[in-house]
Image (cartoon, rainbow, N blue to C red):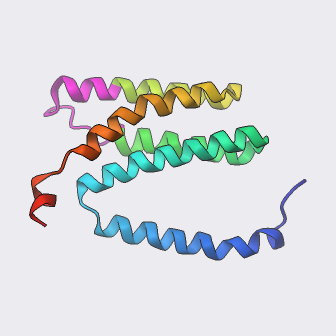
Amino acid sequence: MYATATALAPHAGAGAYHQVGVSTGVAAASPHQLVLMLFDGFDEALVQALGAMRDGAIEIKCRAISRASRIVDEGLRANLDMRGGGSLASDLAELYAYISLRLVQANLHNDASLLDECRRLMQPLREAWASITPAADRAA
């Protein structure tokens, strides 16, 4: 029923390699690419949460939803330029607040449909962001 440290040990190396890859990617990324990485990390966290929810793995579900919440709150919302961003920044802040609320509700009620809703709300933002190529990236 519970995984032991011995049972998890073979996967520890893969996690370390993944972490090094993420760290290297972050260090080499432009600000534009970093935001794209946040969107992708959010989606990965929700996919993991949905799988954990389906499997009844409560601890994994909670960690994944917590990660998604931190990405929204500390990564996306916290870095909005509220002074220079005008109504777009304000609208995004409200959307991110709504998504954060829905993530909490999904976690409390074990509701996969709320996680799906969050993914659907975030996907157009990710696609729009990915379609933008900053001048600095084009020059490189």
Q: Is residue 94 in the magenta section?
A: no
Task: Specify whether residue 90 is painted magenta.
Answer: yes
- Report the front residue among 136 and 128: 128
Instruction: Tell me which residue sits at (31%, 28%) in the image.
Output: 92
Please give the name of the residue rendered at 79% of the width and 40% of the height, measured from the top-left corner: 56
Q: Residue at x 46, y 29 (%)?
A: 120
Q: Above or below — where is 81 with respect to 19?
A: above
The extreme right residue here reads 1
| 110 over 132 or under it: above or below | above
x, y (%) of residue 85? 17, 32
Q: Is residue 14 above or below residue 35?
A: below
Camera-side residue of 104 and 55: 55
Q: Quadrant of the C terminus?
A: bottom left
* Image spot of residue 121 (x, y percent): 43, 28
Q: Position of residue 18 (x, y in %)?
A: 53, 69
> Where does the image place residue 52, in percent across and percent down from the top left?
71, 44
Q: How many marks?
A: 0
Q: Relative to residue 122, is residue 15 drawn left or right?
A: right
Q: Which residues are magenta?
A: 77-93
Question: Which quadrant of the structure image shows residue 12?
Answer: bottom right
In this rendering, position of residue 26 left or right of residue 105: left
- In this picture, residue 134 sits left or right of residue 63: left
Against 46, residue 104 (above or below) is above
